[in-house]
Amino acid sequence: TLTPLGQRIAPLVEEVERAVLAARAAAKSQRAQVRLSVPQALTSLFTQAIAQQRLDYPEIALEIISDNRPPDLKKGEADLAVVVRTVIDEDLVTRSLGEVGWSLYAGETYLARRPAPADPHDLSGHEIVAIKADSSPAAKWLEKHAANATIVSRSNASSSLVAAAVAGAGLAILPCFLAEAEPELKRLTPDVLTKHSVSLVYRREARLAEPVP
C-alpha cells in the first residue's frame, strides 16, 4: 500500500518510466537507420546489394548518399563513408575495402573515325573525355600521357564520362568495373593503367554503439 507521499509521486515515476522507454525506442530506431556516403562512380556496387541486404536485415534502413565530396563524419553528415583518398585522423577508423582499376576505353563511333592509339600510353593527337582535374590517380595519369591530346570535355562523374565515350566524343580512362558493363565500349589495352585504394571510414566512437550488420 502506497503511503500518501508514494501516492503523490507515483504519477511522476510513471511519467519518467514512459519517457525512458520512449527514449530507448527512439535510440533503437536511429541506430537502425544507416547513412552511407559513396562516391558516384561506386554507387552501383552498393545499390546492387540493397535487395539482399533487406532480406538479410529487414530492420536496417540504408540511406545511400551518392556524392564525390567526402562527408564530415564528425559533424554527423553520414554514419559511414566509402572514400578513395587517404584518411589520417585519430578520431576516425579506416578499413581497406580493396582497389579500383582504371583502363582506356573508346566507343565504336569514335573508333570508326579514328584508329585506336598504337601505344595506350601515348594519346597524342586523340580526343579525350577527361575526369575533372584533381589529385586522383586517373587525373594524374591523363596529365602525364595525354599532354598532346585534345580534351573535348571534363566531368567529375564517371557515369558522364561513360556516356560521352559511348557517344563517340573521345577516348576515356574509366573504372574497369563500370566500363566493362557497357557493351558499346571497347577496352583498348588489357593492362590496368592506374588504380586507387577504396576504404570504409567511420567515427571511432561508433565502436561503442550497438553493432549494426
Image (cartoon, rainbow, N blue to C red):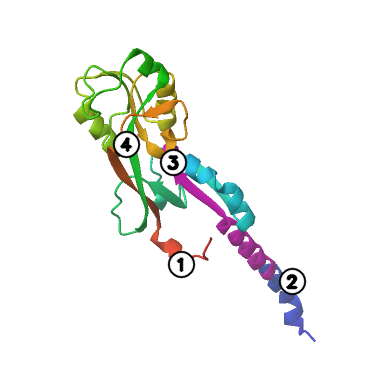
Label pair 2/4, CB-CB below 8 angstroms: no
User: Marks 4/3: CA distance?
Assistant: 21 Å
Counting residues from the start of the chain, the first of labels 4 and 3 encountered is 3
Quickly name the residue at label 2. 11
**Quick check: 121 above or below 78?**
above
Which corner quadrant of the image does residue 205 belong to?
bottom left
| Residue neighbourhood size for the residue with mark 4, other residues' Cα within 10 Å, grouped as few (<14), some (14–19), many (≥20) | few
| Residue range of the region highlighted in magenta in the rendering | 17-41
Q: Residue at x 41, y 20 (%)?
A: 108
Quickly name the residue at label 4. 190
Label pair 1/4, CB-CB below 8 angstroms: no
The amino acid type of the residue labelled 2 equals Pro
**Quick check: 213 above or below 164?**
below
Looking at the rendered structure, the secondary structure element under dot 2 is helix
Label pair 1/2, CB-CB below 8 angstroms: no
Quickly name the residue at label 3. 42
Counting residues from the start of the chain, the first of labels 1 and 2 encountered is 2
Placement of the N terminus among the 4 image quadrants = bottom right
Q: Main secondary structure of the magenta part?
A: helix
The amino acid type of the residue labelled 4 equals Pro
The amino acid type of the residue labelled 3 equals Leu
User: Residue lying furthest top in this view?
Assistant: 113
Q: Nearer the viewer, mark 1 or mark 4?
A: 4
Image location of residue 160, percent across then percent down: 43, 26
User: Marks 2/3: CA distance?
Assistant: 54 Å
